[in-house]
Amino acid sequence: MNFPWLTTLLVLPLVGALVVALLPRASTAVRPVALGFSLASLVVGIGALTQFSTGSTEQFQLTEVYPWIPQFGVSYALGVDGISLTMILLGLILVPVCILAAWEDVPAEGRRQHTYFALMLALLATMIGVFAAIDVFLFYVFFEAMLLPVYFLIAMFGGTRRGRAATTFLLYSLAGGLIMLVAVIGVYLAGPRGTDGFLLTNLEGLDLSVAAGRWLFLGFFIAFAIKAPMWPVHTWLPLAAEQARPATSVLLIGVLDKVGTYGMIRFCLTLFPEASQWATPVVLVLALVSMVAGALLAIGQNDMLRLIAYTSVSHFGFIVMGIFVFTTVGGSGATLYMINHGFTTAGLFLVAGMLIVRHGSRDIRDYGGWQRVTPVIAGVLLFSAMSGLALPGLNSFISEFMVVVGVFENYPWLGVLGAFGVVLSALYMLLMYQRIATGPRPVLADVPDMTGREKLVVAPIIVAFLALGFFPKPVLDVLEPAVQQSLQQVGVQDSVPAVDTANAEGSGR
Amino acid sequence: MTDQFVAPAINYTGLLPLIIVLAGGLVGVMVEGFASRTARYAVQLPVAVATLVLAFVALVVLGPRNQGLTAAETIALDGPALVLQGLLLLISLIALLVMAERLGGQQADAFTQAGASTPGSAEEAFAVRHGASSTEIFPLSLLSVAGMMLFVSANDLLLLFIALEMLSLPLYILAGLARRRRLLSQEASLKYFLLGSFSSGFFLFGAVLIYGYAGSMRFGDIAAAVSGNVGMDGLLIPGILLLAVGLLFKVGAVPFHAWTPDVYQGAPTPVTGFMAAATKIAAFGAMLRVFYVAVEGVRADWQPILAAVATLTMVVGAVLSIVQTDVKRILAYSSIAHAGFVLVGLISMDQAGISSTMFYLAAYGFMTIPAFAIVGLVRSSGTEASQVGQWAGLGRRAPWTAVAFTFLMLAFTGIPLTSGFTGKFAVFSAAISQGWAWLAVVGVLASAVTAYIYFKLVVLMWRGDEDAAGDTVVVTPSLLTVFAIVAGVVVTLALGVLPSPMLDLAQSTAAFLR
């Protein structure tokens, strides 16, 4: 069966974006059509999942490869492994949720509503493209292209400082992306060149000189560190999260920023194994600093959106740490964490959005006692917070545990410090809940509790919390072969004992 | 050496496109002299358009079969010359359509009615009262285009100089013909003329030194002398550098860029677009030939200097663009930065260097003209609203124009799927493959800096501020301008999404005849 699953996945939201944008000005069908296209994409995504085989020996499945710009060695090449497929599905699930959550964000006057939902669908298309590209050039194209929908979502629909937030976001991302462009060209020139020289499979296992490998690694890593975002290049995130609509933030932080950590696995590790080893100590320290600094800064925030953004910096530190310890447990934990963090962030941001709509303030100090006013919303907030602090039985726990175990295998001291990060996460999550929801009943006009639409929004997220918390095995089964494959590639030219043990452990499974 | 003069053989068929353009220009001059004032526009526009179309057809049909050196080896009709000439004709065509915009007579167009009169004088008032219009822009442009076409195929320093003057003189006049703020326009014209003359002087001095070194003005002889190492490098290297000054001035490379912002701002906006796009193509075409054919043998001596110029050009253009508050000045500084990017491709000195430079020139030309065309349409109480603040909220009032301009800004930035990205990729990969990776790093960092100002414009248009910007509107243009803008945008998109045909053309023609 050669149905072009991934191209369909790419085109469908794009068509949707176009249809939504071109609907008549007075049309009332904007939101249903947008939701319909996002759900249709999800269905296609599930179809693609059924075609995916976990036991396959191929590195990538569902591949489609056509020449695009042969003069540059560029192919239109799509394909997925376990990691990218799960990331695509995460995006496919979260976009309909976010469209539903953003239902009332933009009033239906003029064409603003059209633009808003068209941009969301365009964003979905670029998300799918960036994770499905197996040609480095094509990946770069999507990597840059996905900035635009987010940029316009923030610049046109954000808060009062939206212009500044959007520009900061764009400049950080572009600067990183352009440095990566030099590395992209460099890795092509170091490879076999030719008309399909940008194909990932042609660039793996290159015989690079040590210096070249390290420079190219840096070019890629800086871009991904900005995207992830890691300390000290995380400063664009709080501003963007604070100014963007919560639904935009969910897609930006929950899915798009995963391109950073995904790129580290897909490009930094597999293309530059020697340089990855070389950079590991620094990366691990940066990850640790991100984890602790993110957590401490989160504790100090009064703006709830900024607080959630900083918790993400902390969680991304965790993920990066899991990737760079080079153990199967750590790697699988990190990739699982990437999915879990998407849902956790979605829960936190969307509930925060519900509170902000009701009270008109992002400042936590303006709240207090809301569990007496809106018990359901407060309950879901607590639930999301518990997921954020990795309560056993909820999604994040398994992944956080796996990462800590993976870290312990190679770097026990780091494992101890990492566990300390878990404690901090409990602190910022519980403090936030306490300040918002507990206390005496506030004097408020009649504030409605969660509406039916909002319940529909949070239902899939809560289901995901529980499902991934109690039975993550199916997801891990999809992820693990891909993680092992990338670890093997790191190990190929490697003599550091730490990674040999990782391979031995990996192959022993 | 013989005493007898032998008339050189001239391949008139191969030169036909150039001859057509020259003839069209001369016909335009006659029309200016004999046609009545009211009929001129109706005659000039079709003549000019027909000239350019005919020349392009002649080029496509006859050009490939008539390649070779001709006119005693002073003119080279080779791949790069043909591609660049074709490009010049197409770019000039859409630039001319923008220049011909009369806005249906409802609003003031871009050109003064009486360029020769003193601003504010009785003569000017008389011309306005009698409904004069500056139809001389058509022959002037055609003659300039002819000079540019000769410039990219000149294989002789003296002919190169003649072509340089031929393309420059009409531009000096065109720059001074703006309708509004005429003093500013005339100042721009004078500045351009004076500095241009100085740079021509440098160019000539350099040509003389090289003649002293090689004993010939012809590129082939110079190249032979360079490779024969006749041992007078004291003449050669200064000669090359002085020559480079003249050429770098035309593309607006730092430190010879001082005229660019003032002239771009003061000149009538459609002329600015024409100057920015076409002059760059011509001047870079000439530079390619000089550096790749004539003095390639001593490239170790001039490459570092050009690399330094490229670095300065990118950095200064990018950094100064972000502090500008006038859209035309922003585009002027951006054109300086783009000149730096082209230089990066030129420096790489291999076939990819030629083809990437040509590709970038095509990309830049087709995005620049519509950008300036749009600037000319955004108006506030009858005059161009070129202050950045006046563009606020344009996305709501004129969504299609704003979409087009936004897309062009993406192309200027070099976002993938636009020609700007393909061009940047081509020049940077050419440079990296020849060991100029640091230059590419400077280039990408400069692009990131320029992104700030482009996106500042974009965010201003789309942020959705209702109250700002007062009475700024986009006037409804005629089909001429609409066609030019749409053509530019379509080409910009096409060169971004499906660049293969153009890349093929650039790569298959990227060899100079020596």
Image (cartoon, coloured by chain):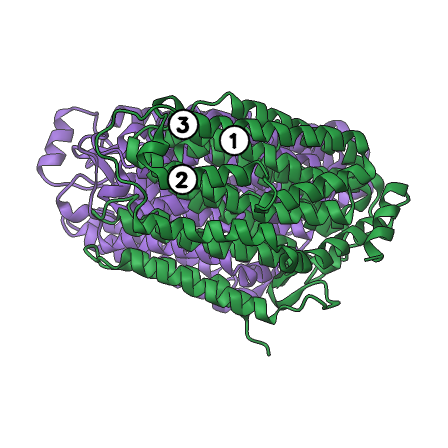
Chain colours: A green, B purple
Most foreground residue, B331 or A96: A96
Callout 3: chain: A
Which residue is located at x 45 percent, y 59 percent? B17
Callout 1: chain: A
Asked if residue B458 lies left or right of residue B287, the reply is left
User: For numbered disc 2, what is the local secondary structure?
Assistant: helix
Q: Position of residue A71 (x, y in %)?
A: 63, 60
User: Which residue bears the numbered disc 3?
Assistant: A438
Q: Earlier in the sequence, mark 1 or mark 3?
A: 1
Q: Is residue A341 visible?
A: yes
**In which quadrant is the N terminus of chain A drawn?**
bottom right
User: For numbered disc 3, what is the local secondary structure?
Assistant: loop
Q: CA distance from mark 3 to mark 2?
A: 16 Å
Asked if residue B126 lies left or right of residue A139, the reply is left
The local crowd at label 1, few if under 14, some if 14 to 19, many if 20 or more residues have their Cα within 10 Å, is: many
Q: Amino acid at mark 1?
A: Met
Q: Position of residue A308 (x, y in %)?
A: 49, 33
User: Which residue bears the numbered disc 1?
Assistant: A429
- Is label 1 on the same chain as label 3? yes
Q: Earlier in the sequence, mark 2 or mark 1?
A: 2
Q: Position of residue A360 (x, y in %)?
A: 29, 30
Q: Quadrant of residue B483?
A: bottom left
The local crowd at label 2, few if under 14, some if 14 to 19, many if 20 or more residues have their Cα within 10 Å, is: many
Asked if residue A306 lies left or right of residue A64, the reply is left
Q: Are marks 2 and 1 in contact (CB under 8 Å)?
A: no
Callout 2: chain: A
**In which quadrant is the C terminus of chain A drawn?**
bottom right
Mark on residue A351?
Answer: 2
